[in-house]
Image: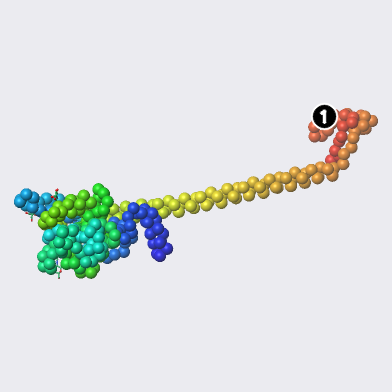
Amino acid sequence: MYVKNTVFTLLLSLVTSYAAPEDWTVSAPFQMSSDSNAGVSTSAYINVTRLVDGIWDWERREVGLYGSGYVGPAKGILIHITSSSNSNDHTGCQQPYRSSASDGKIPNPGIPWIALIKRGGCSFETKVENAYKELASGVIVYNDRDSSNLDRMKLSSDNGRNISAVFTFKWKGEEMARYLENNTDVYVEVTVGRQEPIRNAALNRTSVLFVSITFIVLMIISLAWLVFYYIQRLRNIHAKDKLSRRLCNAAKKALSKIPTKTIKSEDKEVKDGECCAVCIEPYKAVEVLRILPCT
Ligand SMILES: *[C@@H]1O[C@H](CO)[C@@H](O)[C@H](O)[C@H]1NC(C)=O
Ligand SMILES: *[C@@H]1O[C@H](CO)[C@@H](O)[C@H](O)[C@H]1NC(C)=O
Ligand SMILES: *[C@@H]1O[C@H](CO)[C@@H](O)[C@H](O)[C@H]1NC(C)=O
């Protein structure tokens, strides 16, 4: 199992090299967490309410996807998280949290608020754990790259942490962050959307991996067999060559041992008009004859 997993991880790192390993999503195969929502992906509706020209304006869209941890509704004032050391860092990897608003203040305990955090810098787990410690009611993580699909964040679910965390598109996160400019209050409500089985996606990736590994192994085996076969064939040809040369030499040697004689016109073979037993021609004078053992 150890070797197997190492090989898989290696291949996987090639396959998923576009994503940093620390923010792998749940659909990545061979993740070993105890995921109570395993096999189900839950979408999230995000209802964003704000004051525009003195009128409350809201927009509710299904643009979120719950992570693999706690799934439930959440609502509160939206806070775009900023690092206390760098006002351009919205990754929420370090505590204490600050708001991107000019006063930089996080709401007092008891006032529900939602943390708006950018992807990257650390794992989803770290971001959500930090937001939980900062007493947020919910977390919205927005993508740091343009993508047409939502990733399911890999979060632990066996620690009693009852904070909802949803993932949303880059454009949605940036839109909400823009609303918060000029210290405008933005109120967000996250509600549970549709549930869909995700086994197929994970299974497909697993089977693709298996098929590729099998293919590679078969390729190596047939290549090795081919090389072996050609080496064997070459050796056979060489051996045959040597044998036929040896036989040829032996035949020449045997021939040279048979006595010869030059025929003369007064010899009995010419006078009797005998024929050569091999070429069926009469003997002529001055020809060289080989005398076979059977005479
Ligand atoms: C969205 O939130 C606003 C403010 O809480 C609320 O008035 C509105 O009904 C909500 N929309 C939906 C579809 O729930
Ligand atoms: C989470 O658990 C705490 C303490 O048990 C409770 O006060 C709070 O209401 C819970 N929050 C949610 C969203 O269930
Ligand atoms: C913020 O204020 C500036 C200047 O007053 C204005 O140009 C901009 O449109 C405002 N942004 C939003 C999101 O209202």
Query: Which residue is located at x 40 percent, y 52 percent?
Result: 212
Q: Quadrant of residue 73?
A: bottom left
**Image height check: is 50 above or below 253?**
below
Query: Which residue is located at x 23 percent, y 59 percent?
Result: 87
Quadrant for ligand 1 reads bottom left
**Image height check: is 177 above or below 247?**
below
Identify the colour scheme used.
rainbow
Query: Which residue is located at x 39 percent, y 52 percent?
Result: 211
**Image height check: is 111 above or below 263?**
below
- The quarter in which the C terminus is drawn is top right
Q: Position of residue 54 (x, y in %)?
A: 5, 51
Residue 285 or residue 9, whichever sits in front: 9
Position of 11 compared to 122: left or right?
right
Q: Which residue is mark 1?
A: 281
Q: Residues within 10 Å of mark 1 (few under 14, many from 20)?
A: few
Q: Position of residue 269 (x, y in %)?
A: 90, 32
Position of 293 compared to 140: left or right?
right
Badge 1 amino acid: Glu
Q: Is residue 142 visible?
A: yes
Q: Secondary structure at mark 1?
A: loop
Q: Is residue 40 visible?
A: no
Position of 207 compared to 140: left or right?
right
Residue 180 or residue 7, whichever sits in front: 180
Residue 105 or residue 66, whichever sits in front: 105
Residue 72 or residue 173, whichever sits in front: 173
Q: Which residue is at the far left?
A: 54
Q: Position of residue 3 (x, y in %)?
A: 42, 63
